[in-house]
Amino acid sequence: IPSVYSQTQAWRVVYGADRDIQDAYYEIRLIRKNLDLSAELFKKEGKYRSVVRFKSEVDASKKLPDITKIYPERKPYVINLNNWCPNWSQNSTNLNGISYYMCR
């Protein structure tokens, strides 16, 4: 059963899509270094999506311009994770020691 936190605090910014998990993991480390943001990986439609977590839609929207400035070619966008990747919290796995969530 997903926690209350995951149900209500599910706003994210998607900023990357890589076929290789190592490339996606690099993106997570990079955004932490450049903007001090915490990111996660989600596998959706055959790609590892780099996703930054936020407490609210307002927080995600406020930070979107900063993320877009670093990744303009990727066109980052705000999502409600529970709509974008239903049941995500129940589908955690890992590959080569890198954790990610499977979107089904």
Image (cartoon, rainbow, N blue to C red):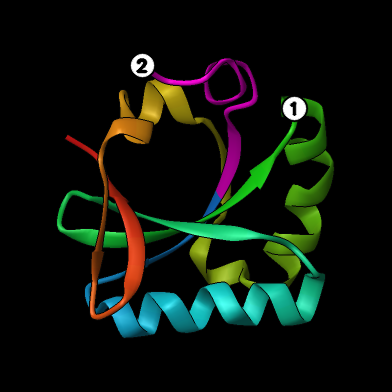
Residue 51 pos. (x, y %): 52, 54
What is the three-letter code of the residue carrying label 2? Ile
Residue at position x 69%, y 61% from top? 68
How far is mark 1 from mark 2, CA to CA?
21 Å
- Whether residue 104 can be seen here: yes
Residue 7 pos. (x, y %): 53, 17
Please state if 64 lies on the left or on the right of 11 as rendered: right
At mark 1, the secondary structure is loop
Q: Which residues are magenta?
A: 1-13
At mark 2, the secondary structure is loop
Name the residue beneath numbered marker 2. Answer: 1
The label on residue 56 is 1
Residue 61 pos. (x, y %): 76, 37
Q: Is residue 18 above or below residue 63?
A: below
State the image quarter where residue 72 is shown.
Answer: bottom right
Q: Is residue 45 above or below residue 41?
A: above
What is the three-letter code of the residue carrying label 1? Ser
